[in-house]
Amino acid sequence: MCRTCIPILTSQRDSRPTEPPAAEASGADKDASRFPVRRILGIDPGLASCGYGIIEVCRSRCRLVEYGVIETSAGMSHALRLLSIYKEISRVVESFSPTEAGMEALYFARNVSSALGVAEARGVLSLCLAEHGILPAEYPPNTIKQAVSGTARAGKRSVQEAVRLLLGLREIPRPDHAADALAAAITHMHACPLPVFSGGG
């Protein structure tokens, strides 16, 4: 297989947040022992670039765990692109064990062929999560903007900056699809204050 036909996975660990003081970290450990810790996977579905982000929530505090993108080349077979997305998101779920998920809902775009590709990727992602016992909640773009930045009219840059502030990061997560995925995870945190388990396995 040629180099351009190999799926690309890029990710960033949680080294980007500023380190909390030792006393504060100790307090967080105590909270974790007294209150349930939620691990939420956010997804920005796409065929060429699928963003994902994982946050951990304890009471009203949230921290970044992981984020990245799954990229597939247009030179690949369509079926292999979907298979790559399925395998990589499976790896993410198995590596970080999220118990909940929030996904940006599909909206109709002028480019019908692009929308169909996103819909297919979304189906593969939903299937993978269901197989792991996670039923993803879906949120329209305006709902995500409202939950993260406080206004449904916020621009992309404003939403990304809000994500950075809420997670205590030094820089805005890159690329954009990863930041969008984290925004979906944060939206789910607000929309579902208590963890919801599907009972699957």
Image (cartoon, grey):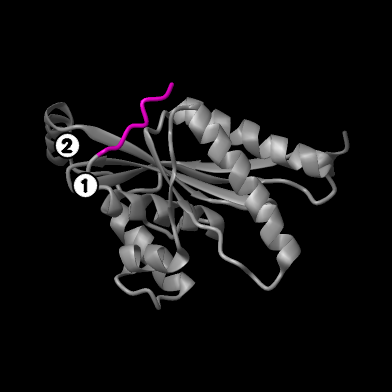
Residue 89 on image: x %, y %:
57, 36
Write the residue at 61% across / 44% down: 123
Q: Quadrant of the N terminus?
A: top right
Q: Is residue 71 visible?
A: yes
Instruction: Sort mark 2 into few (<14), some (14-19) or many (20+) by Cα contacts within 10 Å.
Output: some
Write the residue at 73% across / 40% down: 7
Residue 154 on image: x %, y %:
40, 75
Q: Which mark is residue 28?
A: 2
Write the residue at 36% across / 25% down: 199
Q: Was residue 134 drawn as part of the magenta stretch in this picture? A: no
Q: Are marks 2 and 1 in contact (CB under 8 Å)?
A: yes
Magenta stretch: give its range: 195-201
What residue would you read off at disc 1?
61
Q: Of helix, strand and loop, which one carries label 1?
A: strand
Residue 179 on image: x %, y %:
47, 57
In this view, 161 is above or below 196: below
Question: Can you tell which of label 2 and label 1 is closer to the viewer?
Answer: 1
Q: Distance from label 2 to label 1 (Cα)? A: 9 Å
**Three-letter amino acid code at disc 1?**
Arg
